[in-house]
Image: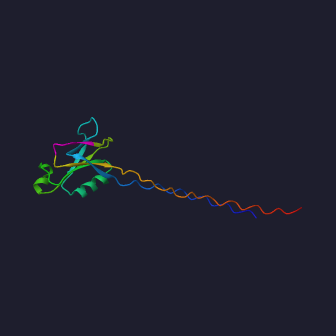
Amino acid sequence: PPQPPLPPPPPPAPPPPPAPRIARAIGTGYCREAGDVPNSFDTAQSCEAQAACFARCRAADVCVAFAWAADPLSPHGGCRDAGLPRCVLYRTTALQRAGATDAAARAYTCFAMQQPKPTPRSQPPVLRPPPPPPPPPSSPQ
């Protein structure tokens, strides 16, 4: 009797989602571009804790860096006068990256957003169909 056909192999698993971005401290001061274009970022500011500042930047694809000060020295945004920390998000759609700082704003630390380095993953086993059954013994004629 003929063997039933083997079922098709399962589809490959979808790739895992990208890992959440991480923040790397790059220096003291406001964030600046890593190139020849000076201070071309779009910025947004708020008075919030460092963890909240990081979370807002990580959630926005266009946010490439943030500067944060626990005790801002300037009155920008009213944070200093309210006794609150200050967060400045740096946004761009032109593929710029933060790679420098303006050390004049010494109360701030600039953090650049990055993808984490990939970790080696073990490959899933390759599934192969079972070998065909051996042919039946031949009968004498």
Q: Residue furthest top?
A: 36
Classify 90 as above or below 8: above
Q: Position of residue 94 (x, y in %)?
A: 32, 41
Question: Is residue 12 part of the magenta span, yes or no?
Answer: no
**In the rendered view, does 133 fall on the left or right side of 52?**
right
* Residue at 28% from the left image edge and 40% from the top image edge: 34
* In the displayed structure image, the side of residue 67 where residue 12 appears, left or right: right
- Kindly give the residue lying farthest to the right in the view shown: 141
Magenta range is 99-105
Q: Quadrant of the N terminus?
A: bottom right
Quarter of the rendering containing residue 42: top left
Q: Residue at x 26, y 36 (%)?
A: 37
Which quadrant of the figure has residue 102? top left
In-front residue for pair 113/25: 25
Q: Is residue 93 left or right of residue 140?
A: left
Q: Is residue 104 magenta?
A: yes
Question: Residue 99: x and y, percent?
Answer: 28, 42
| Quarter-of-image position of residue 2 | bottom right
Q: Residue at x 35, y 55 (%)?
A: 20
Q: Where does the C terminus fall, quadrant-wise?
A: bottom right
Q: Residue furthest bottom?
A: 1
